[in-house]
Image (cartoon, rainbow, N blue to C red):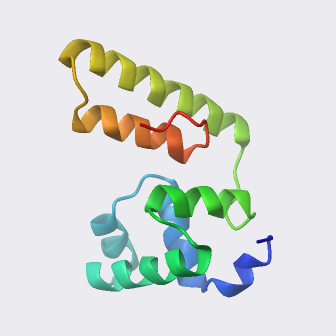
Amino acid sequence: MSGDVAVYLTQRQVEILTLLSEGVTFPKIAEKLGCSRGAVNSCVAHAYAKLGARSAAHAVRLGFEHGILTGSEAVYVELARVYRALAEANAQIVGKPTPMVRAHAFGAYLLGTGQAA
């Protein structure tokens, strides 16, 4: 798959992937775009199928890999470092994986550090 993938995504799909990459939740995306949550879910499902993605994190990561989404790599590396540190600190405090730990591990994965939980 090459950067040509962007040609196959609709403008709305790219817009939603961009918002996902910024950490915006599905309900907030629907609110921001003035559509239903179901419309966002449907759009995302079609984008996943086109990209061959298994999750939001995977779709966003593929978006960056294929040039559909762009941004400063240094920012993503730093954010991944912070997510990883927060996940480790939370795991030490709680003593087991929690939704917060999984959220931070998700952030690290999303940012492509290979530190997925």
Q: Taking 78 as reference, is 90 left or right?
A: left
Residue name at image x 72 percent, y 44 percent: 72
Rendered-image quadrant of the C terminus: top left
> Residue 18 location in percent, x, y?
55, 64
> Residue 66 location in percent, x, y?
74, 64
Q: Furthest-top residue in view? A: 92
Residue 34 figure quarter: bottom left
In the rendered view, would you say 96 is above or below 34? above
Q: Furthest-left residue in view? A: 94
In the rendered view, would you say 15 is above or below 89? below
> Residue 42 location in percent, x, y?
38, 84
Residue name at image x 38 percent, y 19 percent: 88
Residue 51 figure quarter: bottom right
Q: Nearer the viewer, residue 19 or 99?
A: 99
Q: Taking 73 as reference, is 29 left or right?
A: left
Residue 41 figure quarter: bottom left
